[in-house]
């Protein structure tokens, strides 16, 4: 028999939790969180994970800037099923996994330019000169991965299982 931890024990602040959320709550949870892990699938079927900077666009897609030669871009082109892990404040904070379908656009495609503008806006707000920004993205040969969320996990926080505590 496992001995229950008193509810007022200092370990109670590290109690694990899972909160089911809807799309609106997901939008709220992602606000201000831009350090993500993108999981794509390699040609051999194994996962490939990349640390990325991303943003939730006004229309609810996840935007990630990259380059056509990067593994994440090549993998997302080959297999559009991707997952994104969005962590909260620090490693011990809350996190959510978002699964979705990726579309990849390369400059100078207007869809890439629009996606990169959405990416910038979702992270930094308005740019002083959008024409200059679009030209810089074209000059750099940028790509953008746009992910349409299809499902997401509860917002989770690791720690001690709640059943270890007294009621």
Image (cartoon, grey):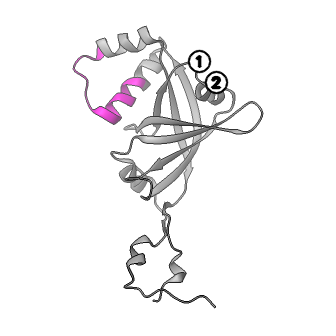
Residue 6 percent coordinates (x, y): 43, 88
C-alpha span from label 2 to label 1: 7 Å
Q: Quadrant of residue 110?
A: top left
Residue 123, magenta (yes or no): yes
Residue 74 percent coordinates (x, y): 64, 24
The residue under the point 54% across, 57% down is 153
Residue range in magenta is 116-131
Report crowding for label 2: few under 14, some 14 to 19, many 20 or more residues within 10 A (C-alpha).
Answer: some
Q: Quadrant of residue 76?
A: top right
Task: Tell me which secondary structure the magenta stretch mostly adopts.
Answer: helix
Identify the residue position indicated by label 1 in the image.
69
Of callouts 2 and 1, the N-terminal one: 1
| Between 75 and 163, the one nearer to me in the picture | 163
Secondary structure state at the residue bearing disc 2: helix
142 sits left or right of 27 in the view: right
Quarter of the figure that contains the C terminus? bottom left
10 sits left or right of 67 in the view: left
- Residues at badges 2 and 1 in contact (C-beta under 8 Å)? yes
- The answer to whether residue 21 is above or below residue 60 is below
Q: Quadrant of residue 7?
A: bottom left
Quarter of the figure that contains the N terminus? bottom right
Residue 59 percent coordinates (x, y): 41, 38
Residue 119, magenta (yes or no): yes
- The answer to whether residue 110 is above or below residue 166 is above
The residue under the point 29% across, 32% down is 124
Secondary structure state at the residue bearing disc 1: loop
Identify the residue position indicated by label 2 in the image.
74
The residue under the point 38% across, 78% down is 10
137 sits left or right of 127 in the view: right
Residue 84 percent coordinates (x, y): 54, 43
């Amino acid at each position: 028999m496992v001995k229950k931890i008193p509810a007022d024990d200092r370990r109670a602040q590290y109690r694990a939790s899972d909160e089911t959320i809807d799309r609106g709550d997901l939008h709220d949870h992602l606000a201000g969180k831009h350090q993500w892990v993108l999981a794509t699938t390699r040609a051999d079927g194994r996962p490939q994970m990349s640390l990325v900077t991303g943003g939730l666009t006004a229309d609810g897609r996840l935007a990630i800037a990259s380059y056509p030669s990067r593994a994440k871009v090549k993998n997302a082109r080959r297999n559009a099923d991707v997952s994104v892990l969005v962590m909260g404040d620090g490693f011990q904070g809350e996190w959510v996994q978002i699964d979705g379908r990726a579309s990849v656009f390369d400059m100078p495609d207007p869809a890439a330019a629009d996606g990169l503008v959405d990416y910038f806006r979702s992270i930094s707000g308005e740019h002083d000169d959008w024409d200059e920004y679009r030209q810089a993205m074209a000059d750099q040969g940028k790509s953008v991965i746009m992910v349409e969320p299809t499902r997401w996990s509860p917002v989770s926080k690791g720690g001690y299982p709640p059943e270890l505590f007294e009621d």
